[in-house]
Amino acid sequence: MQWFATRDWSPETRRSARSAMTGFYAWAVTTKRLPENPADGLPPIPTGTPRPHPVPEDVLHDVLVTCTPRVALMIRLAAELGLRRAEVAGVHRDDLRRDLTGWVLVVTGKGRKQRVIPVPENLAMRIRDEADANFGYLFPGQHGGHLSAAWVGRLVGRELPHHLSMHSLRHRFASAAYGATTDLLTVQQLLGHSNPRTTMGYVALGADAARRAVNAVSTAA
């Protein structure tokens, strides 16, 4: 239970992990590999209404100015492309490609599912140059491979106010992308969510969006 409590997961991920753990240990008890189910004491994960917590734009700007270039690139991948920390950690030069519309990044997310995310020219050049300099991985590890997701999250978390995390950068992307397009399906696909309800929990609607909606109704009336 202590291990479970220390995970920095969204409620959806936490519910999925709880279900997997209880199912596994139930199987272990049924097959007499364990005398009892240690996951029985895990409390249920409340559903509730998700509350988006995007990093404010002024905070994002200040952090990008003060942090190191390497950490700034990690932050940009989360805040501007919506990547999870594990996805940021694993970016490779071969993942960056060019199609008929411009630069794209092939991202391998949860469940080894892949999605293709358009990348602005300036960010694509930054990814390409840095990955080329590192001979492959954008954020190489000291002993081969790439940095761990936990370490990437820790490096970014050090730069953010204590009440925000790297996941808040992903919420920033979702909120900004939805604000620019009002297209929930597109935002869902860019984030790699299987359920639009999950995406709705990432999108914070600003006061200006609410005012535009009210004004549109008023004008129509």
Image (spheres, rainbow, N blue to C red):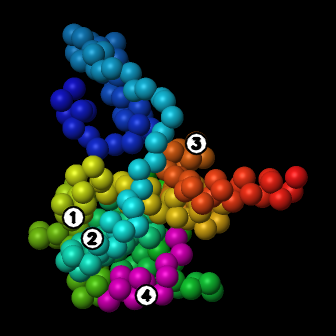
Could you tell which of marks 2 and 3 lies nearer the N-terminus?
Answer: 2
Q: CA distance from mark 4 to mark 2?
A: 19 Å
Magenta region, residue range: 117-129
Q: CA distance from mark 1 to mark 4?
A: 23 Å
Name the foreground residue: 193 vs 165.
165
Could you tell which of marks 4 and 2 lies nearer the N-terminus?
Answer: 2
Could you tell which of marks 2 and 1 lies nearer the N-terminus?
Answer: 2
User: What type is the residue that disc 1 sits on?
Assistant: Glu
Q: Is residue 115 left or right of residue 59?
A: right
User: What type is the residue that disc 2 sits on?
Assistant: Val
Name the foreground residue: 50 vs 110.
50
Quadrant that contains the N terminus: top left
Residue at the disc numbered 3: 197
Q: Is residue 146 above or below residue 203?
A: below
Q: Secondary structure at mark 3?
A: helix
User: What type is the residue that disc 3 sits on?
Assistant: Arg
Question: Would you say the residues marked 4 and 3 are in contact, meaning their CB atoms lie under 8 Å apart?
Answer: no
Q: Position of residue 74 (x, y in %)?
A: 30, 70
Q: Position of residue 90 (x, y in %)?
A: 32, 66
What is the crowding at mark 1: few (fewer than 14 residues within 10 Å), some, or many (at least 20)? Answer: many
Q: Position of residue 103 (x, y in %)?
A: 51, 83
User: What type is the residue that disc 4 sits on?
Assistant: Asn
Q: Is residue 120 left or right of residue 212?
A: left
Residue at the disc numbered 1: 159
Q: Secondary structure at mark 4?
A: helix
Q: Secondary structure at mark 2?
A: helix
Could you tell which of marks 4 and 3 lies nearer the N-terminus?
Answer: 4
Q: Secondary structure at mark 1?
A: helix
